[in-house]
Image (cartoon, coloured by chain):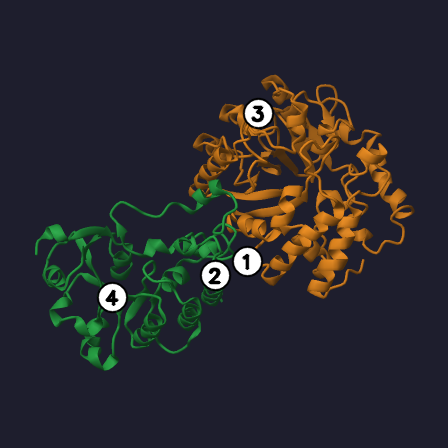
Chain colours: A orange, B green
Amino acid sequence: MLRIIFKPTERCNSNCKYCDVVKKNVVKDMPPELLGTVFSRVGEYLRTHPGEDISFLWHGGEPLILGPDYFRQARDLENKYFPAEKARVHHAVQSNLTLLTPEFLEVFRELRIRGIGTSYEPLPGIRGFGAARDWQAYNRDLSRAISLMKASGFTYGFIYVVTREALPHAEELFYALTNFYGGGRLTINPVLIYGEDPHRLAVTPEEYAEFLGKVFALWWKNPDRYPGVNPFAHYFNTIIKRRPTLACSDSGDCARSFLYVGPGGETSQCGRSADWGIVSYGNLKDRTIDEVLRDPKRADFEKRNSVLASGECRGCRLWGLCHGGCPLDPFPEHGNIFHKTSLCAATKTFVEKYFEPITGHKYNA
Amino acid sequence: MTRNNWTIVDSPLAWRIQGEPAKRAIRVTSLADLREAAGLEDPEIGGILADLPWLRLPDLEAASFPAKPSLTLYLGGAGELLAYSDKLAALKRPGVSVFLPPTRQGITDLRILSSLGVRCGILFGREVPDWDFLTDLLCYAAYTKTPHAWIEPFAYVHANYKGPSSQLDWRDAYFRDAGRGPTAPEDAFGGGLTACTSCPGWRVCGGALSAYLSPEGAPCREFASALLETAEYVHAKNNI
């Protein structure tokens, strides 16, 4: 499946402390005619790859800032460019939800969307509106949106970003996040800081592993009570069930299956590489999706596996769990992707100090 | 006695007992008012809430039990079984229930009433619960295989818990001032990380025990967690 991370806008109504989009401060939307170009490229790809589906993730910025009409245009463009193939396009939305209205849900239904990914930060002052970062108003709007989604039969899942401020509150945060379970996943990630860290939010790999370890002990007692909590479910599936379901960062196979499209039609490997401005595959105005996926620069992502497996990661018994981690992780330090992730110690510490002893299952590749 | 002494309260509990569309109940605070309300025939009234915390079951009269609308008794205790055994038939009628405070004696009385087939419940908010006794009563309500009548709020939670997406507030099962209900669970979002939202049992409590929180901690936390465990057990049992 091709995974398109589609960012039609860089604008956002929130002011999250750790956000790369906020740091960039770019005010840019994809104009309607370019949206048409993107959808015609998608139609082209669907017809030349009849057996393949596309995951189409609306990302931002805040995608809902574009208003429901923008999504209605997308619905009409599907009917114009790939009416017979649209069932093979699986739309998803990652949104802060604070602008959600019933009109959005109506058009989302028409786009076959039944769930929305969002973020929730119970700690004060990290996510919020305006210069004062009004977190209470933000969470109130999020709460209102969640009530609306529940009443309309939509599901939601959370991403939680672990910052330095979260470290002393691991257990409380876990319960607060899972108490609002909405049928989707809860994904826990470390904050990723590229460049300066004026708010001192960054966590070390060991600190992140300790946070995960505390939370994992709670999750493991009753995984059915807390469904879809990652990275735990990924590790559970991979280590115990032996049916790997690794995140993109650990899968080692993102080279040819991910495509980022930005508001100017520019393409990159993924949202993160675009936010950091470190990989460019040209513009969909000039190139087809196939051409972008065949870009020679993608060969580096494929080559990375063999470089690491015979180099820095050689002999590591956990290789199959992380494949050296996200190729972009080493970029801030090394300026290239041919090194293992800076979060290597987090994976090792979590698996060997917590996952394996707590579950009694040892990872065997 | 006049109707001015009566208060109209929303009665979701009465609705659940009777299986009829939601109705309101009359709240009375004296035996005389209860006697008069028991004789009332008003299709708009679904039940009577007799709020008499200074009384026990032996203090009630036969005339206190209405023929039709449901009767919920908020009492201070049950009293000696021998002293109220003559009222057992009336107490076991559908629509009649007895609510007692969560003190050690109240909880002991509730266990006896439940085992006798009298529908009953815990009257929170007036006495500080004995949390260990309360947890024992919860386990009795959820796990015992001998026949017994339901005990609120356990019955409400066990009937309505549908898995991880559930966010219950058992105050929905209690009488409350007309038009005033608990706030939606999602409203806790805006409050961020609180003793309630970070409690493992929050999804089956919804803040109903928040009156017991203190700067020293959350004494209700273990009980709420145990309530969630029983809810999961009952849910799993019902879905085998």
Residues at discs 1 and 3 both on one chain: yes
Q: Which residue is mark 1?
A: A225
The structure residue drawn at horizontal position 13% and vertical position 71%, both measured from the top left corner, is: B61
- Mark 3 is surrounded, within 10 Å at the Cα level, by few (under 14), some (14 to 19) or many (20 or more) other residues, namely some
> Does mark 3 fall on the same chain as mark 4?
no
Q: Quadrant of residue B145?
A: bottom left
Subunit that carries the residue with mark 3: A
Question: Does residue A140 sit above or below B197 in this rendering?
Answer: above
The one nearer the camera, B17 or B105, is B105
User: Under tag 4, what secondary structure?
Assistant: strand
Quadrant of res B90: bottom left
Q: Is residue B45 visible?
A: yes
Res A246 seen here: no
Q: Chain of mark 4?
A: B
Which residue is at 32% across, 76% downward? B112
Furthest-bottom residue in this view: B82
The residue singled out by tag 2 in the image is: B228
Circle 1/circle 2 CB separation < 8 Å: yes
Q: Residue beneath label 3, please?
A: A77
C-alpha gap between disc 4 and disc 2: 27 Å
In the rendered image, residues at marks 4 and 2 fall on the same chain: yes
Mark whose residue sits in front, 4 or 3: 4
The percent coordinates of residue B159 (x first, y second) are: 39, 61
Left or right of B134: which side holds A217?
right
How busy is the neighbourhood of tag 4: few (under 14 within 10 Å), some, or many (20 plus)?
Answer: many
User: Horizontal placement of B143 versus A132: left or right?
Assistant: left
Tell me which residue sits at (72%, 51%) in the image: A209
Q: CA distance from mark 1 to mark 2?
A: 10 Å
Task: State which mark lies toward you, 3 or 2.
Answer: 2
